[in-house]
Image (spheres, helix red, strand yellow):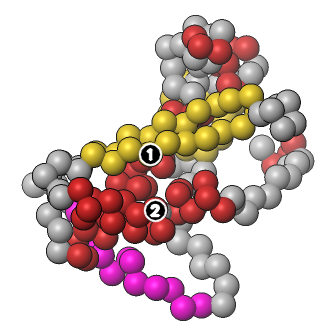
């Protein structure tokens, strides 16, 4: 028997605090691999060792393919988070979901504003057997709750810094 179980819908209860309260930090390190370029031949390893994979430039960007890429990893995180939030909301609402599926496409594009690059995302929810209006309301509510949806909608707080070589 598996020890796996979904979180309690109580995780949806509102937080009442004056400061952001961190709950978990996922940390990965990317090195450049064979070409020295993280996007083309990078190696991703999480601090707990649970994630370890090779990055490869997709063939559509002139690479060989054959490995994952940053857009796939972001899409996977978004889809997993949205799926989880949707299931929690459905449970709280007494809805029974039968094999729900979330598909996320993250697109790497050229930005006409600054001539550089941008990301966009598209989320599709497959909710077999759920009445269309109920499904639409569930997805709208999930978009309000899911932190990835919030990040894409509002941006994200981020800090970029240079760390002394001795810290590696």
Position of 89 relative to 161 (above/below) = below
Q: Closest to the observer: 37 or 117?
A: 117
Dot 1 or dot 2, earlier in sequence: 1
**Left or right of residue 160, residue 75 in this image:** left
In percent of the image, x 14 and y 64: which residue is there? 96
Q: Is residue 8 magenta?
A: yes
Residue 13 visible in rendering: yes
For the point 74% across and 28% down, the residue is 110
Q: Is residue 133 left or right of residue 57?
A: left
Q: Are marks 1 and 2 in contact (CB under 8 Å)?
A: yes
Q: What residue does disc 2 label? A: 143
Residue span colored magenta: 5-17
Q: Secondary structure at mark 1?
A: strand
Badge 2, how many Cα within 10 Å: few under 14, some, many 20+? some
Point 51% across, 86% down: residue: 15
Q: In the picture shown, does residue 83 fall above or below 50?
A: below
**Dot 1 corresponds to which residue?**
123
**122 sits left or right of 113 in the view:** left
């Amino acid at each position: 028997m598996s020890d796996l179980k979904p979180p309690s819908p109580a995780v949806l209860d509102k937080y009442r605090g004056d400061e952001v309260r961190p709950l978990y930090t996922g940390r990965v390190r990317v090195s450049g691999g064979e070409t020295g370029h993280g996007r083309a031949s990078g190696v991703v390893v999480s601090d707990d060792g649970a994630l370890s994979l090779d990055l490869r430039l997709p063939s559509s960007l002139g690479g060989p393919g054959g490995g994952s890429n940053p857009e796939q990893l972001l899409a996977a995180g978004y889809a997993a988070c949205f799926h989880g939030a949707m299931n929690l909301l459905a449970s709280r609402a007494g809805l029974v979901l039968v094999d729900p599926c979330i598909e996320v496409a993250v697109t790497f594009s050229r930005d006409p504003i600054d001539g550089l690059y941008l990301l966009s995302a598209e989320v599709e929810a497959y909710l077999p057997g759920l009445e269309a209006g109920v499904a639409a309301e569930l997805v709208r509510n999930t978009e309000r709750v899911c932190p990835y949806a919030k990040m894409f909608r509002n941006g994200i707080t981020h800090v970029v810094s240079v760390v002394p070589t001795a810290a590696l």
